[in-house]
Amino acid sequence: MAHITINQYLQQVYEAIDNRDGAFCAELLSFKHPHVANPRLQLSSPEEKCQQVLEPPYDEMVAAHLRAFQSHKEENWALPLMFAVTLDLRIFANNAEQQLQKKGKGQPGEMMEKAAEQLMSCFRVCASDNRAGIEDSKKWGMMFLSNQLFKIYFKINKLHLCKPLIRAIDSSNLKNDYSPAQKVTYRYYVGRKAMFDSDFKPAEECLSYSFHHCHRSSQKNKRMILIYLLPVKMLLGHMPTPQLLKKYDLMQFSDVTKAVSEGNLLLLHNALTKHETFFIRCGIFLILEKLKIITYRNLFKKVYLLLKTHQLPLDAFLVALNMMQVEDVDVDEVQCILANLIYMGHIKGYISHQHQKLVVSKQNPFPPLSSVS
Amino acid sequence: ASISKSQNTTKTTQASRTTAEVCHHCLHRACVISVNNVLTFQCFLFSPQDWPQAMKEYVQRCFTACETEEDKDRTEKVLKEVLQDRLKDGSAYTIDWTREPLPDDSDSQSDSSISSDLRPQLSRRSQKVARGRGNDRDRGRGGGERGRGRGGKANRGRRAGLDFHDPNREAKKQSRAARFHKQLRSEPLVLSINALDLPDGTQEGLSWEDCPIVGTCQDTTKSYLRLTCAPDPSTVRPVHVLRKSLQAVKAHWQTHQDYAYACEQMKSIRQDLTVQGVRTDFTVEVYECHARIALEKGDHEEFNQCQTQLKALYKDNPSENIGEFTAYRLLYYIFTKNSGDLTTELVYLTPALRADECVAHALALRAAWALGNFRRFFKLYLEAPRMASYLIDKFVERERKVALRAIVKTFRPDLPVQYVQSTLGFSCLDSCMAFLTGLGVTFTASDPQKIDCKTSTASLAAS
C-alpha cells in the first residue's frame, strides 16, 4: 500500500467500484488507511488522473476524498464508504474547530455545524429511500449517521436537534436490526438526551440497555455509559455497590452514594465539592445536585422513623439539619424544603403553618423513590 | 415531520405497488401514489415533462413484463437513464416506441431501432445489473460495520494488482476506451476546495471585514448604518474621537434616558471599532457600557449580544469587571433555562472567578433555583449586587408562580399573606396582594389576610 503508484491506486479503486466491494472501497477512501502515507498519491491536482481512470463522480470523489454518493439511487453497497467518509468529516471538523479556536477566529461550533449539515443531507437520502428490497435499502445507514450527528450535537450543545433523528429511527421498521455496536451507541445518546430532559425512567432504560449490551472488552465505553447511568439510577433510589465502582474506576461516586443513602448532607456537599471538576466536565454535576433532594428525603424519613408519630414538629427537622452541620438554615427554609418534597411526591402530607408541624399520611408517607418522578 | 410523512406515503405507495407507472417528473417509481384511485406524483423535483403517449405505453409494457419486485427495481433503473436521455435530446418524440425493445431484451444486439451510441450504454448497464445480483448473495444486512467482513472477502482475491483471470477484462477495457469518446464531464474537473486564489484575484475566505482601516472622521456623534462593504475612512472615527463619543452617549443617557438614541450611538461606536480592528481595553469599556444600558432598559437581546462579545474580548483584555459580567452571563442562562451552556460556563470558572462577589452570588442563586429552594432564591434576589437584579427581574415573576404553586398545594388549611410576602421577596404587602389576586388566589372568609390554600390550588391550576 505504501509504494503503489497513483495508477495502481486508482486501478484498485476502480475495481472496487466495479466489483461493488463497498468495504474495500471504503478503506481506500478512509484517512485511517495506510495508503494516505504514500507520497506518490499526494498529487496537488489529481483531478485529471482521476478523471482518466474513474467515471464521475468517483473521479471527483477520489480526488477530493470527500463527497456524498448521491448517484447510487438504487443500491446501498457504498454505505461503508459513506461511513468512513462521514466519520472523517466529523473528525476533521473537530480538528478545524480546535485550530480556529487557537487562532481566536470563527464562532465556536461553526465547523461542527457545517459538518452536521452535510451529514444531515446524507441522513435524508438514507431515510427517504423507499426501495422495495430491504437488502438494498439505504435505510441501513440511518443509525450510523444518527450516531455521528448525536456526537456533534452534544458537542455544540444543540440537543434539541437530536429529536427528529430519534423520531425517524423510532418509526423505522429496521430499528432493532442494526448491528449491536450501533445500537449500543444509539441508546447511549438517546439515554443521555432523556437525562438532559429530566426523563429519568426512559433514560435508565436506554442507558441500562447500552451498558449491558456493550461488549465486555470495551471497558472504556462501559465506564462512559456508567458515568451517566449511575446518577440516573441513584435518583431512582438504586445505589451502586462499592464493587461496581471499584471495577470501573469510578470511586468519585462512592462518597456521594454513601451520603445519599444515609441522608448525610454534609458528606454529600463535601463529596460534590471534592470531585466537582470531574463531575462538571462529564456534564453530570447538575444531575448529581438533584441528589440533594433525595438526601433531604432520606434524612427526614429518619426523623419520622425516630419520632414515631405522624405529626412532626418542624423544629425536629431543623435540629436534624443542624446535626448534619448544615448552617444558615431557619424554620422558614425548612418549610420551603418540605413544601418541595411534598410537591414532588416524596412525602405524602401537608404543612400546618399555624401549628408549625408537618402532618404526614398514616400510610406510606415516604413512598419508595422508584415510584416517584 | 417530513420523515414520517414519507413513511406514511410509503405505505400508500406499497399498497398500490401493482401499478406499472413511473413518476413523470423524477422517473422514480416510489413517487407514484394513488389518491382516491387517481395516480398522483408526489415529487416535484423537475418541471413537469410532456411525455409522448407512445412512451408512456412503452413504460407500461416494460413493467407489465416484470415478474418480481426486483425486476421492477432493475427495470426502473434502466428506464430512468434511457428515458431521461431521450427526453433531453428530443428523440423521445421522434422514435417509434412501439419497436423499442424492453430492457430485458437488450442482450440481443440485433435490434436496429436502438441508435448505436446508446447501445453500449444499455448493454453495459444491464450487464452490471445482472452481475451484481448474482455475486452478492452473502451480503445480507449490508449497512453495518460488519459488512466489511462479508461482501468484501469474496472479492478480495480479485484486486491483487493486475488481474489476469477476469473474464470480463476485455469488455471492461473496451468500455473504458469507449468512454474517452464520450466525455461524461463536459468540462475538465476542477475542485473548488482550498482554492484560496480565485480567478479574479480575490482571496476566498477573506472578506472586506478582515482588512482593517484607519478612520479620519472627527464627528463625535454618528448615526448607525449597517455596512455591506468596506466603509470610507473619512466616515470612520479614530479611537481618540470615539472616547469622546462614549462620554457623550453616557451623559445623554443619564439625562434623557432615550434608549433608542443611546443604542444607536453605541452601535455605531462599536462598528467603528470593528472596522478598524480595534480590540483593546477601550473596546471592552464600550461593550460593558452598552451592556449596562441594555440591562437598565431590560433589553435582554442586546444585552446578550454585548455579553457574548465581551466573553471573547476578555480572553485578551480582561477588565476588572470580568466577575460582574460572568455573573450576568450565569443569570442570563438561568433566564433562558439553558442548562447546556450553563454547564459549559461552570467548566471554565477559575477559583479566582468563583471568589468574586458577583459570581459567588450568581452561583448561590443558581443552586437555590436548581433545587427549588425559593426561600433562599428570593433572599438572594433582594441581596443582588450591582445590576444583577435587573437580570433577575426578568424571571422573578416566573419563579414566584412556580413557588406559589408548591406553597398553595402543600400548606393546609390556610396561610398568612405575610408569609408569602416575605418568602417570595415582595417589598410590600400591596404588591404581594396584587400578585396573588392576579393569579386567582382566594382568601378565607374569616380573615382576608389569610390564603385559603385548598380552593386556591384549584384556581391556580386553572390559571
Image (cartoon, rainbow, N blue to C red):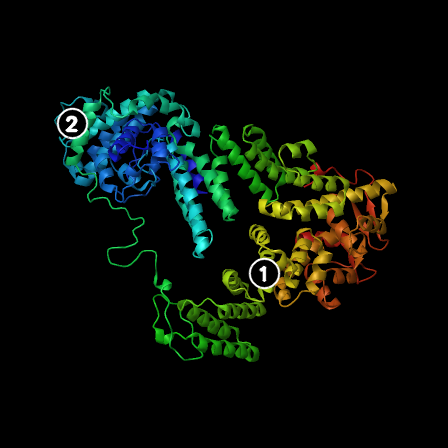
Query: In the picture provided, is B79 more to the left or to the right than B109?
Result: right
Badge 2 density bin: few <14, some 14–19, many ≥20, Cα 10 Å = few
Badge 1 density bin: few <14, some 14–19, many ≥20, Cα 10 Å = many
Q: Amino acid at mark 2?
A: Arg
Q: Nearer the viewer, residue A347 or B459?
A: A347
Residue A55 % position (x, y): 24, 35
Look at 77% across and 49% down and name the residue there.
Answer: A338
Query: In the picture provided, is A319 more to the left or to the right than A203?
Result: right
Residue A34: name its quadrant. top left
Answer above or below: position of B68 versus A206: above
Disc number lying in front (2 or 1): 1
Quadrant position of the C terminus of chain A in the picture = top right
Residue A79: name its quadrant. top left
User: Circle 2 sits on which residue?
Assistant: B99
Chain letter of mark 2 equals: B
**Is tag 2's residue or tag 1's residue first in the polypeptide sequence?**
2
Residue A126 % position (x, y): 40, 36
Q: Amino acid at mark 1?
A: Thr
Answer above or below: position of B280 versus B64: below
User: Circle 1 sits on which residue?
Assistant: B326
Quadrant position of the N terminus of chain A in the picture = top left
Q: Is residue A279 visible?
A: yes
